[in-house]
Amino acid sequence: MSPNDLCSKGTPSPVANNPVHIIDTEEKEAIDVDDDTLQGSRTDKRLNWSREEDTRLERVKEPLSDFHACWVKSARVWQSGMSDDQIKEKAKEMYANQNHDKPFTLEHIWKVVRGEKKWSAYVNRLNKEKETMQKLTQLKW
């Protein structure tokens, strides 16, 4: 018996059972987003947000970016021995002071988006727009 006989009998093709190949050949599956809207399931690979989801995102953008700015300031003034929780508490205090003692209630969302590159890019763009608007207002006066 030659070594070629063993390979041709027992070794499966690496392409035939490749999980990526199997996933790519499957039909588009409905993406079930648990929401209260009357819209049907969406079948796109990239989700298109509903009007309600867009509205919710628009409502949380500003408070999230404000809190993130407070967190960044708190982290920059990091003192030796401060834990992440202490930095977060300091940022919450700073946020409350800036917003008429209103507590930050979107921490669960902030924890998800704070490490995302897309969110960081959005915050950077928002900061640049604020700086530009401040410069324009100063020039007008």
Image (spheres, rainbow, N blue to C red):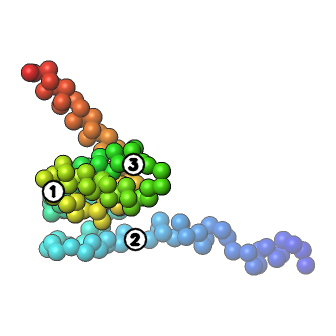
Question: Cβ–Cβ below 8 Å for labels 1 and 3?
Answer: no
User: Residue 129: horizontal and vertical position, in percent?
Assistant: 23, 35
Position of 40 with respect to 73 (left or right) is left
- Disc 2 marks which amino acid? Glu
Q: Please name the residue that numbered disc 2 is placed on.
A: 27
Answer above or below: position of 137 versus 87.
Answer: above
> In front here: 107 or 34?
107
Where disc 1 sits, the SS reads loop
Answer above or below: position of 48 versus 8.
Answer: above
Where disc 2 sits, the SS reads loop
Q: Can residue 122 be seen in this view?
A: no
The tag earlier along the polypeptide, 2 or 3, is 2
> In front here: 71 or 53?
71
- Disc 1 marks which amino acid? Asp
Q: Badge 2, how many Cα within 10 Å: few under 14, some, many 20+?
A: few
Q: Please name the residue that numbered disc 1 is placed on.
A: 101
The tag earlier along the polypeptide, 1 or 3, is 3
